[in-house]
Image (cartoon, rainbow, N blue to C red):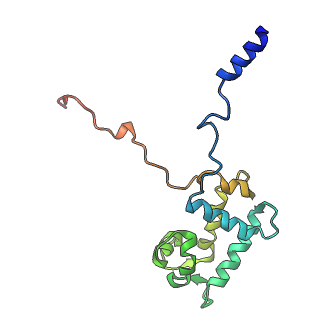
Amino acid sequence: MIAVRLLIATLLLSPCGCQPGTIANVNAEPSAERLEYITQFKNIDTPNRGFITLDQATAYYDNLFAQLDKNGDGYLDAAELKVLLPIMQAKTGAELLTKLDRNVDGKVSRSEFLVIVNWLFQLASSSDRLTLEDTQKGAPPSAPRPKTRDPADTPPTGPRRPG
């Protein structure tokens, strides 16, 4: 009988996964950014396997580049990028051009455009395979993080010593 009471007391006093704050809120709505990663993932995962490869994503965005390049010059300008504004969370074609134009020549080449694949795969737990579960997790490493104050940036307090 003492053993049963001891077991009950241990169970009642020990932390468990059912306490508030110990597990993620599964009912929480994903952020708009996270929803876009999930949407892009599902666009690429046409066989609905629950994962995509780096090659699949590259082929998808390579094809998308070709579709967007309306004038066939091998580059995308701000007007051709406008279609992607909701996807890339930009307000204007010029803003999106600035995000993607790595060499600042005023246009986006195919290789500059394919950097989107790298952004998507920052979520991956594997270097060549991204799962739907990966896209549903936390923010990618390159996502802006809240700024924390660096103690080294704090000016010293107290009386100044003569130099």
- Residue extending furthest toward the left: 162
Left or right: residue 158 versus residue 152 is: left
- Residue sitting at x 67%, y 30%: 16
Percent position of residue 131, x then y: 74, 57
- Residue extending furthest toward the top: 2
Percent position of residue 68, x then y: 62, 83
Left or right: residue 108 versus residue 135 is: left
Q: Quadrant of the N terminus?
A: top right
Percent position of residue 94, x then y: 46, 77
The image quarter containing residue 15 is top right
Front position in the image: 6 or 145: 6
Front position in the image: 32 or 117: 32
Percent position of residue 21, x then y: 59, 38
Using the image, determine if residue 109 lies above or below residue 44. below
The image quarter containing residue 161 is top left
Front position in the image: 100 or 14: 14
Q: Quadrant of the C terminus?
A: top left
Using the image, determine if residue 154 lies above or below residue 158. below
Front position in the image: 83 or 56: 83
- Residue extending furthest toward the bottom: 71
- Residue extending furthest toward the front: 1
- Residue sitting at x 73%, y 52%: 126
Number of numbered discs overlaid on the protein picture: 0
